[in-house]
Amino acid sequence: MTAIRVEGLRKSYGDFAAVKGISFEVADGEIFALLGRNGAGKTTTIELLAGFQQPDGGSCQVLGLDPARDRAAVRRRTGIMLQEAGFFQDLTVARTVDTWCDFTAAPRPRDEALELAGLLPKAGTRVRQLSGGEKRRLDLALALLGRPDVLFLDEPTTGMDPEARRNTWDVVRELAGQGTTILLTTHYLEEAQRLAGSMAIMDAGEIVASGGMAETLAARSGRVAFRLPPGTSPADLPLPVTLEGETAVCRAADPDLAAQTLLSWAAERGLRLAGLEVRTATLEDLFLDLSGSHR
Ligand SMILES: Nc1ncnc2c1ncn2[C@@H]1O[C@H](COP(=O)(O)OP(=O)(O)OP(=O)(O)O)[C@@H](O)[C@H]1O
């Protein structure tokens, strides 16, 4: 089943087109990463999917419903974590969640939501005394409260320390394992690569790449990098390389095989390939390549 379907979706603010006819689908229980530089149109897309804004054209469906028309029904079955939450600064964490519970049908028990978000030890703390990362965790607890079928997370781990970030990844994976569909944005590409089964990269309101994470990355070349041995030049090597400062970089569909070829060549000549690094394509490689070519 398709949990989220977006077709030719458009949204402008005055003369400025923020989302220019994008299309993508997210399957039930999938973790989908919507990526792109600042201002690419990610938050606008989430707001359209959550029914906070009306599209100017195209369509979107969440759980088979039109968020603009069936806003209440969509809100009941979705959870959302936006970048800026408006909390009452003087309430404690526990009271904030309790207040939210009053507006949520069949909420999780408060402590369960806080535990999931890693915020139970701060239940008695006032919101104004929370750190930036802790406020994000409170946002997460509130987004999870209604046991949503679809969860929109806009930069959920911004400001979190590495441990909190990993805990959040675990929660996201656990929820997806239980069937929750998750659409998240993040500027941490490693996070997207680890978490998401599929993704779309937006640039200036358009989708410039999309697909399954593993398939998309497998289709791109990997990289072998090393310092050029003294007395050799790129022309001496058995494979084409480019120079990045002192470092020779060889791009290859199979970087392990390329590394073996280069190492055999070096061994036959008694040379060392100092600083050798072999890696398959990362999402960051793809992202940086695309960012350059679409401006
Ligand atoms: N209410 C608004 N009025 C006018 N322009 C807006 C409005 N909201 C967003 N924009 C513009 O639309 C563009 C897309 O914004 P959006 O917030 O969707 O980007 P984003 O990809 O989420 O960026 P970021 O990664 O910085 O959060 C930006 O150029 C932004 O300035």
Image (cartoon, helix red, strand yellow):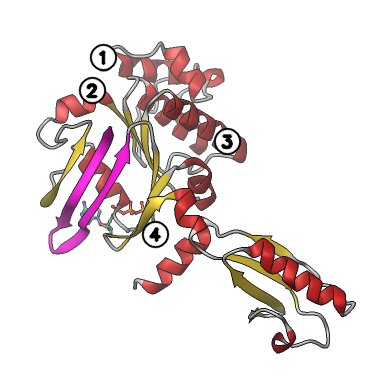
> Can you say whether 188 is above or below 131 in the image?
below
Instruction: Please identify the dominant SS of the magenta region.
Output: strand
Q: In this image, 70 relative to 247: left or right?
A: left
In the rendered image, residue 200, in percent from the top left (x then y), is placed at: 36, 52
Task: Give SS at disc 1.
Answer: loop
Query: Cα distance, mark 1 to mark 2?
Result: 7 Å
Distance from disc 3 to disc 1, alpha carbons, whole Å, reads: 29 Å
Amino acid of disc 4:
Arg
Q: Where residue 287 sits in the image (x, y, percent)?
A: 45, 61
Disc marking residue 76: 2
- Residue 16 sits inside the magenta stretch: yes
Q: In this view of the protein, can residue 1 be seen by the observer?
A: yes
Left-right relation of 54 to 178:
left
Q: Distance between the residues labelled 1 and 4?
A: 36 Å
Q: Are discs 3 and 2 less than 8 Å apart at CB?
A: no
- Binning the other alpha carbons within 10 Å of mark 1 as few (below 14), some (14 to 19) or many (20 upward) gives few
Question: To which residue does mark 4 refer?
Answer: 37
Query: Could you tell me which residue is drawn at 59 percent across and 71 percent down?
Result: 251
Element type at mark 3: helix
Point out the stretch of residues depicted in magenta: 1-27
| Depth check, front residue: 109 or 100 | 109
Disc 4 residue lies near ligand 1 with CB under 8 A: yes
Q: Badge 2, how many Cα within 10 Å: few under 14, some, many 20+?
A: some
x then y, percent, for residue 221:
54, 65
Please, what secondary structure does the residue beneath circle 4 have? loop
